[in-house]
């Protein structure tokens, strides 16, 4: 009787193929997660842009109403207080074209970065976002380059006195390094809180 020993030479190659397949699936999962973050960020930016556009339209309508009221009062021969005229003029002069700035912001965002949140309070525009970190990059360099883009753009940087990053944090999502960041842009207008404190001190 002849004993036959069967050796499966394909076993090692099949294991390597399965390992490579799992690695490929992991890479695609990481890519899908980053793509989802970017798409979500861009969708939110479009939504915020629409909201700011509505606010701008309302403010422009209010300004037109104020101008019309001034014209009506002038025709009626009524005297307006100097403070009222200056306040109305300041309101018209200080209005910021947010639609243009948001369009510029969308144009300046790199393809591997997404804005996740925008907040404007007092005179500060806070920009939150997430960006992919490549192996040969540092998170500080990514933010410095993005801030330089904002500062060098005439449309976005107009009316801002300072653009700096507030905070950043590095994290890993499905073996892909990303950085969450916050950037603050200071609008070139008087600080409303300073006026409130002065009024409170006079009391």
Image: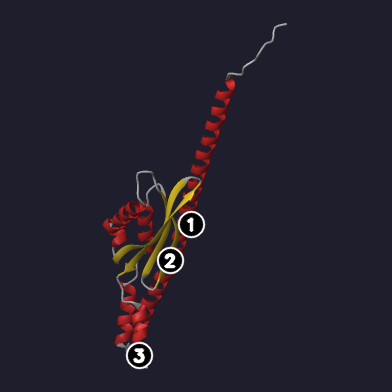
Horizontal and vertical percent for residue 174? 51, 46
Q: Earlier in the sequence, mark 3 or mark 2?
A: 2
Q: Is residue 19 left or right of residue 2?
A: left
Q: Which mark is residue 44?
A: 1
Using a 10 Å C-alpha cutoff, classify the residue at mark 2 as few (fewer than 14 neighbours), some (14 to 19) or many (20 or more): few
Residue plotted at (40% across, 65% down): 126
Q: Is residue 29 visible?
A: yes
Q: Is residue 6 left or right of residue 43?
A: right
Horizontal and vertical percent for residue 102? 38, 59
Residue 201 vertical position relative to residue 181 in the rendered view, above or below: below
Mark 3 or 1: in front is 3
* Residue of label 3: 201
Q: Earlier in the sequence, mark 3 or mark 1?
A: 1
Q: Which mark is residue 167?
A: none
Residue plotted at (44% across, 67% down): 55
* Residue of label 2: 119
Q: Is residue 4 left or right of residue 144?
A: right
Q: Is residue 181 visible?
A: no
């Amino acid at each position: 009787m002849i004993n036959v020993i069967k050796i499966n030479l394909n076993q090692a190659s099949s294991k390597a193929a399965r390992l490579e397949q799992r690695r490929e699936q992991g890479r695609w999962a990481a890519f899908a997660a980053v793509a989802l973050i970017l798409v979500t960020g861009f969708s939110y930016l479009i939504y915020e842009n629409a909201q700011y556009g509505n606010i701008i339209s309302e403010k422009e309508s209010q300004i037109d109403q104020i101008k019309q009221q001034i014209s009506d009062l002038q025709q009626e021969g009524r005297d307006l207080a100097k403070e009222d005229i200056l306040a109305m003029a300041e309101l018209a002069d200080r209005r910021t074209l947010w639609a243009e700035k948001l369009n510029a912001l969308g144009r300046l965002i790199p393809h591997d970065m997404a804005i996740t949140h925008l907040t404007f309070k007092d005179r500060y525009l806070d920009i939150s976002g997430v960006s992919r970190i490549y192996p040969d990059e540092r998170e500080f360099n990514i933010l410095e380059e993005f801030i330089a883009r904002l500062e060098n753009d005439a449309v976005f940087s107009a009316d801002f006195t300072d653009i700096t990053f507030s905070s950043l944090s590095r994290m890993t999502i499905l073996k892909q390094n990303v950085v969450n960041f916050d950037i603050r842009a200071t609008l070139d207008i008087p600080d409303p809180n300073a006026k409130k404190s002065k009024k409170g001190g006079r009391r």
